[in-house]
Image: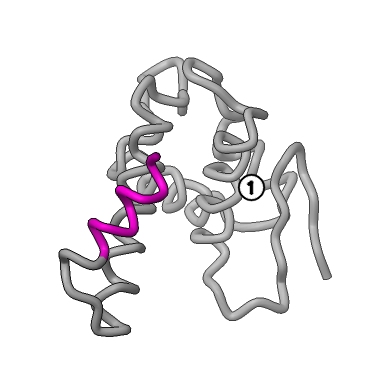
Amino acid sequence: MITRTMLLRLDTSSTSPIYLQIAAAIRRAITDGELGRGDRLPPARELARALDVNMHTVLRAFAVLRDEGTLEMRRGRGAVISSDAVRADLVRLVGELVAESRRVGMEVGEVLALVEQEMR
């Protein structure tokens, strides 16, 4: 079953933890331009109620996004998309590229050549 709220989709049949699904959905909304710098997310309690999950699950997703630089947590203002959100998303993707490159046994020079080729 897929649950929707605002721009978030959760797949309750997935083996991926709910908090990671929430974080991924927020990242996707940023990448897709649905959320941008300075946009405020709903309060954790409200979002948890809408998603029918525990508030601490939402807070854990917010903490992941805060730690990677995607969200700023402001007292009295809640969770706000940071000015570095797009950069943080790119840094995360580079990390995934590096991990996958290592997994398949690519050398640094090969990866850099691929990146240079794509940048042109």
Asked if residue 12 lies in the magenta stretch, the reply is no
**Residue 9 x/y as whole percent:** 72, 54
User: What amino acid is found at the position of numbered circle 1 in the picture?
Assistant: Ala
Give the farthest residue toward the left.
108
**Residue 74 x/y as whole percent:** 36, 21
Q: What stretch is highlighted in magenta?
A: 111-120
**Residue 107 x/y as whole percent:** 17, 74
Q: Which residue is drawn at 34% across and 38% down?
A: 88
Q: Mark 1 points at which residue?
A: 48
Q: Residue at x 32, y 53 (%)?
A: 94
Residue 81 is left or right of residue 109, and the answer is: right
Mark 1 lies on a secondary structure that is helix
Residue 16, compared with residue 27, is above or below; it is below
Give the farthest residue toward the right.
1
Residue 55 is left or right of residue 91, and the answer is: right
* Relative depth, front residue between 116 and 31: 116
* Relative depth, front residue between 54 and 79: 79
Asked if residue 116 lies in the magenta stretch, the reply is yes
Q: Residue at x 66, y 36 (%)?
A: 46
Q: In the rendered view, how is the structure colored?
A: one colour
Residue 40, compared with residue 1, is above or below; it is above
Task: State which quarter of the image contains the C terminus.
Answer: top left
**Residue 65 x/y as whole percent:** 39, 43
* Relative depth, front residue between 5 and 37: 37
Q: Residue at x 58, y 80 (%)?
A: 15
